Image (cartoon, coloured by chain):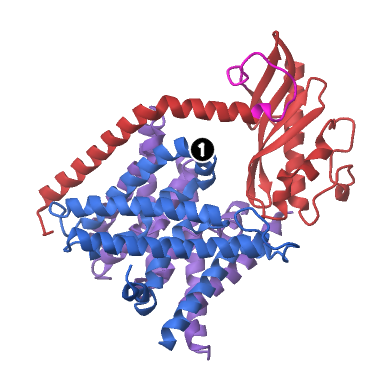
Chain colours: A red, B blue, C purple
Amino acid sequence: MKERNLGYKTTFIVLLSAFGFVLLFAIHALIDSTLKARLAAQRLELITSVIDTEFDENPLENMILINSADGKEKLELYPIRQNGVINSVVIRVGNPRGYGGYLEILVGFYTDGTISRYKVITHNETIGLGSKITEEKFAEQFQYANPERMAFKVTKDGGDLDAITSATISSRAVIDAIQKAFDAYQRFIVGE
Amino acid sequence: MTKHKCLDLVKENYLNVYLLAIVPILGVSTTLLNALSMALILSFVWFVSTFIVFALSKVIDLNSRRFSYFLVLALMVSVVDLLLPLVNLEFYQSLGIYLPLICCSCLIFETFDANLEKSAKVVLDDILYKIVTLIVIMAFIGAVREFFGLGELLGYKIVAYGIPKVLVLQTSAGAFFVLAFLAFVINWVRGEK
Amino acid sequence: MEFIITILLVNNILLFQFLGVDILVNRKAKEHSPSLLVFVALLLMAFCSVLNYVTYFGVLKPHSMEYLTIFAFALNVVLSAVVVRFLCEKLFGFIYDNFSEVISFVSYHSLVFGIGFINIQEATCFSSYLGLNLSEVLAFGLIAWIVTGIGKHLSYNQFPKYVHPLPLLFLVLGLLAMAFKGFANAFY
């Protein structure tokens, strides 16, 4: 290794980066279709994990974007159809006000607005406390609950839902996110 | 892996240097499995790129060599970034930012510099020894954080009634505390010699 | 206000994502003052933000070539290091003579590259991307100043010999991380 002049250096860096781009491009071209299929399968699995109705159309292809109730965000909505009739709806919703920042959940609704289940996709909550939002013990109280027919808050705020012990902020974040999804869902039902 | 070499870790304040490699990937050391996988990925990138740099060492310019190192590392990390989702999609998605950060590992730069004028056999010996040390350190950090933080190891409760969980070890502060302990032990052993 | 506090305190880049810890750990960092490191990092970050934004939203995203992001951003860090080194030697060369050393020192650590990479997904416009990046560099600077200051004071105390210097640094960082986690309650 020795010192070279500026032209040599520049040529070398340019050649190296060109080679890099070509190599990455080639690898990507080889694996692209496999990877896309994997990702689609994973998304489909996630979406179907929050509902228990049957479907015969791919929800990923029917995805539509709807405005949230305050009109500031676009939420992804996946209608689940069988024989052309919507029997449930999955909405993907995020909330930046978790204890550790942004959290993102998928909520499934039956057509009457009852929640079937929710699933946390990404979260940053404290492990052992806030991370219990992913566990069944907290999640099961949302099953078959309807935000309209109950006080959809934690007991601390005068509602009907039990918060996770010493993780009230995380519980509130999940409840707020579900509420946001429910509001969007109602707009979707009215719009139809 | 001679005995002489293993003592080098203690003798030459290598820990200081190893931490430079570990720090960017500390975020995924919350469990033993994650820490080990990340250490293996880092080792793979390190191993391959060392030999690429070794092969290119005749044509790399001396003054701008760190540019070339950085680019070679980034290229290898990109290749891993493309191929890893095919191997394990969930693990890949849990890595997030920490996979790209491998290409800022200063330790790798330093070994590139150290191995320039040597023969291939010496380089292989050196790199294997360093990789094993890195994996051991990462595994230690991951094991401590998982065992004392969650009370289990590799997902199994190995103590029958469980141990009191020190949840702070699972947060980033816990990673710093484990590193402090590790650095203290190595300083201590080095001082006693 | 909330934005600044969130970036500087609640989600501090150094304490919770470990970006830039390697700068503090590196023995060479002691040769430079934290203010100089932060100044250089700000310059690098500003140039890098421009390049990153243009490459990501101008080239990579419209053609759905996001898989090239890591390599392209590494190239951007290298390019901005070259540009900033050139500018600094022209503009500030009479103040510090070791600028080029500091620039290469900062650019090969995880700070500039990592911050640029994290924020590109969340960026809505160029000014938000630049603002996020620069304030996160400042968040690094805040901790760097605190740690250097505490370290200087602690070095006068009678600690056991083996606690110096690294274990003490990590201990301080850990305590700071626990303390800063408390700021998360500031808005509830």
Residue stretch rendered in magenta on the structure: A47-64
User: Image quarter for residue C178?
Assistant: bottom right
Is residue C149 something one can see in this rendering? no
Residue A34 higher or lower than C70, as above or below: above
The quadrant in which the N terminus of chain A is found is bottom left
Give the quarter of the image for residue B69.
Answer: bottom left
Tell me which amino acid carries mark 1.
Answer: Leu
- Tell me what residue is drawn at x 33 percent, y 42 percent: C72
Binning the other alpha carbons within 10 Å of mark 1 as few (below 14), some (14 to 19) or many (20 upward) gives: some
Q: Which residue carries the number 1 mark?
A: B89
Image coordinates for residue C98, horizontal then vertical, percent: 26, 69
Which residue is more in the foreground, C25 or C103?
Answer: C25
The secondary element bearing badge 1 is classed as helix
A125 on left or right of B50: right
Q: Where is residue A60 shown, x and y percent of the image? A: 59, 21
Q: Residue at x 78, y 52 (%)?
A: A168
Within the magenta stretch, is there residue A50? yes
